[in-house]
Amino acid sequence: MNWIILIGVFAAVALIGLAAKKFGKRPPDPSIEEITKLIADFIEGKGGPYDWDDFVTLPLQNPDREKIRKECFEIYHNYPSKKKTEWCSEEGMQQLRKLYAQLSKPA
């Protein structure tokens, strides 16, 4: 009887370990091209409902991409909208357009 309980405990631990490996992994950072498209989609009102929020709130591992993410996030704070339905003011959108233009330039 004890061996059945012991097998059950080991099985539970193994399942928890597998779930942690599967769900605990962080997705890879988006490429510069993906970030550029994400900014363009946001400016144009396209993209998924949480794409922009996920991008600006989840830190990235790559320092260059993290710098871009932070710049986008700071626009929200530096150019707040007076309307609750908008993420930032028109000045903030202009800043996003400038950033998009910089990222879109060929290297």
Image (cartoon, rainbow, N blue to C red):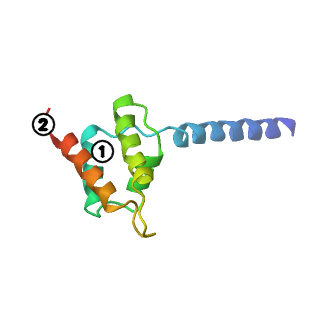
Q: Secondary structure at mark 1?
A: helix
Q: Position of residue 67 (x, y in %)?
A: 37, 35
80 or 73, nearer to the observer: 80
Judging by the rendered image, the residue that carries numbered circle 2 is 106
Mark sitting earlier along the chain (2/1): 1
**What is the quadrant of residue 33 in the picture?**
top left
37 or 10, nearer to the observer: 37
Residue 92 vertical placement versus 26 (above, below): below
Residue at (55, 39) in percent of width and height: 24
Label 1 crowding class (10 Å Cα cut-off): few <14, some 14-19, many 20+? some
Disc 1 residue type?
Ile
Farthest top residue? 63
Q: Is residue 23 visible?
A: yes
Q: Position of residue 96 (x, y in %)?
A: 29, 51
Is 69 displayed left or right of 99 in the figure? Answer: right
Disc 2 residue type?
Pro
Label total for image: 2
Is 75 displayed left or right of 38 in the figure? Answer: right
83 or 85, nearer to the observer: 83
Label of residue 35 in the image: 1
Residue at (76, 38) in percent of width and height: 9
State how far apart marks 2 and 1 are (Cα). Answer: 15 Å
